[in-house]
Image: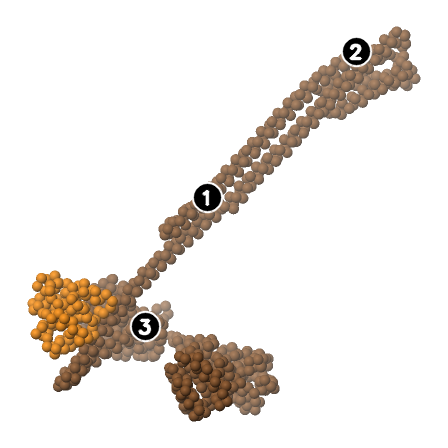
Chain colours: A brown, B orange
Amino acid sequence: MNLSKRIALTSSIILVFYFFTVVVFLWSTKVSRENVDNLQSVIRSQYLVSDISQQLKELNTRLKVLDAVASAQDKKELDQVEQENLLKSVTNIDEALNTLRVTAGSDLTDRISGIESADEIISQWKVLIDRAEETGQAVQIYSLVAFGYEFDNTGAQLTRDGVVLRSLSSELNREIDESEALINRVSMLVFLVSALIALTLIYSLIRYTTKSLSQLRIGTREWSRGNLAHRVFVTGKGDLAVLANSFNAMAEKLDASMEHAHEQRQRADEANKAKSGFLANMSHELRTPMNAIIGYSEMMLEDIEDGVELDPEEVQADLGKIHGAGKHLLGLINEVLDLAKVESGKMGIYNETADLQQLVNDVTTTLQPMISNYENTLDTVFECEDREIRTDVTKFRQILMNLLSNAAKFTKKGKITVTASQFMEEGTDLVSISVSDTGIGMTAEQLDKVFDEFTQADDSTTREFGGTGLGLSICKKFAELMNGRIDVKSTPGEGTCFTFVVPAIAEDIETEETQKEQSDESDDAKTRGLAKVLVVDDDESSREISKRILSKRGYSVITADNGAAGIELACAQQPDIIVLDILMPGMDGWQVLEKLRDIPETGGIPIIMQSMLSEKELGLSLGADDYLTKPVDKSDLPNAVRKLLPELKLHEGVLVIEEDTNLVGLLNQAQGEEPFEILQTADLDEALQWMSERRLGIILVGQHSEMDAVSKFMGSVNRSEEYGDTPTVLLNSIELESMDADQLLSFIRIHQEPEKASGPT
Amino acid sequence: MATILIVEDNEMNRDMLSRRLKRKGYDVEVAVDGQQGVEMATASLPDIVLMDMSLPIKDGWAATKELRRNEATAELKIIALTAHAMEGDRQKAMKAGCDDYDTKPIDLKRLLEKIEKFL
């Protein structure tokens, strides 16, 4: 049960008990009120009974007195006053009886026996008095006195009733006491029980929480100590159990990632070790042929210096050794470069179509001498018909050469078999070349490392068989680059079989160059001060193609996807050239052309129309400066743009002020149909000299160690009357690094147009 | 004249060094692996042993140690002559018992100075 449910349950149980307590309280209040009411009516009845009894007694006594007086005076009737008094008394008693009946209620009335007899007397009295009044005669005293006995009797009865009522009231009193005591006990019990249950629940809640939290605390402590195998144990399915499980999962993940990190570190350590080993090995491998080269050449130099007569045969042999060692060195360096290229991801794949059988035969023929050298025989088996494959032939050949030369190296007086076959795997047409030998073979441990970089089977292999331990790792990497693989099987002492599998028809993938082209677009550093071209075209892909082609040539390109936006951009950005598509929804190219020509700000901007429609003449007559029919060749658009830009004024020369030759190199590459002279110097005085001698097209400033002096120089040139017209432009190192020849030309062009020039001139 | 034993597996280096040393007037003997090196050193007790380190059958370190263990050859002057020129390689050679250490490619002048020092 989760924590919130536990708390809810505890609270509801406490509430239920509280409710019970309230019910008991209400019930007890009701019971006591009833008891008190009963007691009140009993006490009142008791009072009324004694009052009635008293009144009856008094009436009786009065009657007796009246009777005595009457007998003394011999008077048999009551006088008027007496009669009224009597009547009044009787009425009072009657009323009292009625009150008693009401007060006592029916239950109690039954228990008061005197009421009936008192009622009887009173009613008989009333009959007597009523009759006397009817007849107009006075009431006879004797008739009244005749009730004397009943009076006494009734009085006694009422007295007894009083006693009964008194005992009843004390009984009720006792009952009230008892019920109160009972109520108190019940309330107390309910309170105690609910308090107990509440406390128990709270206690268990706290205990569960504390226990779980302490488990978690212990867990975190253990984990922080590094004991990641520790697991927190929390019972139930509650929140804390869930939390504990999350903690456990976290610990598990942490444990796994720690292990992973540990493994990685170990692997990195191993790689590092392998790299240091490789460096040592490389150093060794480079020094060994170098020793021969330097040694033999020094020896020959000494001979010449000492005037020793040279034996041509000996010289030839020694030169042959120098040559061989040099070639060996070159091979080594190439292998290292290959590996470095693969590792830095710069190794490209260039697929060509080739004949499989011919390719394999080429390699076996090349290596035949090496194979025969160790008295091995070679079998070449073609399990498939002769076929064409499309793959990176150079790498294919290199892999096969490596596998075959390894087989030749590690086999003596044995047999080497090259098997070519083809098969389908997961819908891919694959070719497989396996090279098996009957050579020294490899142990399982050696097999594990056979493709690792910088590793050979063991150090003694290097000594015995030479090599850098790079060949197979290069092969494996090449195979992977070609979407293929190399597998190996081997038994020590029996031989080794390498199998090289590649797709028979390789898919041509996007080369790095095209990727670079794309990334060029976003390079803002290049676009400072370059000619700006606005491309207006509704078709996204053709807009993007134009943009990419132009950006690559060093133009800063802005685009609009409809005519109205194009006009707006043209007004706002004042491009140097506008490239305009004709077929566009809304405002078409013709309308845009007309509008652009009408607006003074854009009237003078050269416009190149570009369309599927062959309407060149119409376009030119409507004011377009050039017209290209789609599809356009890659170089058509940039050429058209270049033609419309102001002419380069470089015939009198470009002065380059820089200490290295970056700019000069770029300018040399940019030399085209109209060659221009490049004057380079780092010396500012010499620069001034040249400036005074001829009219220069532009002065370009590149890297210079004394930039302060150069800035001052540029400032004074710009201000001077004599040279102020010659644009002087500083290129920062970022621009220099990122610019190619085309971009530099367009950069120069834009700076020769004073109103377009920007940047520090 | 002093006798120098060259222990070297690489044929070119062996040929080149022996010729150059002979021209300088030393008597030169050659061994092509560590085992042969130990045998020849024990048999002819040369004045100087130029010991390559990466050798087949028995490497230069093991051969040097063996020579040091044998009473007859314990005092031989052994110069490690190796293409192992990384940090620690000198210590490794000296620890095996070499008296000096030089690296390939050989600087003949420097090597001769080292040889002369021991003669």
Residue closest to the eye, A178 or A277: A277
Q: Is A79 left, or right, of A416 in this rendering?
A: right
> Along the polypeptide, which appears first: circle 2 or circle 3?
2
Q: Residues within 10 Å of mark 3 (few under 14, many from 20)?
A: some
Say which mark, if any, is on residue A149: 2
* SS state under label 2: helix
Residue A260's image quarter?
bottom left
Name the residue carrying label 1.
A210
In the rendered image, the vertical position of residue A462 relative to residue A314, given as above or below: above
Name the residue carrying label 3.
A340
> Along the polypeptide, which appears first: circle 1 or circle 3?
1
Residue A573's image quarter?
bottom right
Chain letter belonging to callout 3: A
Q: Amino acid at mark 2?
A: Tyr
Q: Residues within 10 Å of mark 2 (few under 14, many from 20)?
A: few
Same chain check for tags 2 and 3: yes
Q: Residues within 10 Å of mark 1 (few under 14, many from 20)?
A: few
Chain letter belonging to callout 2: A
Chain letter belonging to callout 1: A
Residue closest to the eye, A459 or B77: B77
Cα separation, mark 1 vs mark 3, equals 60 Å
> Along the polypeptide, which appears first: circle 2 or circle 1?
2
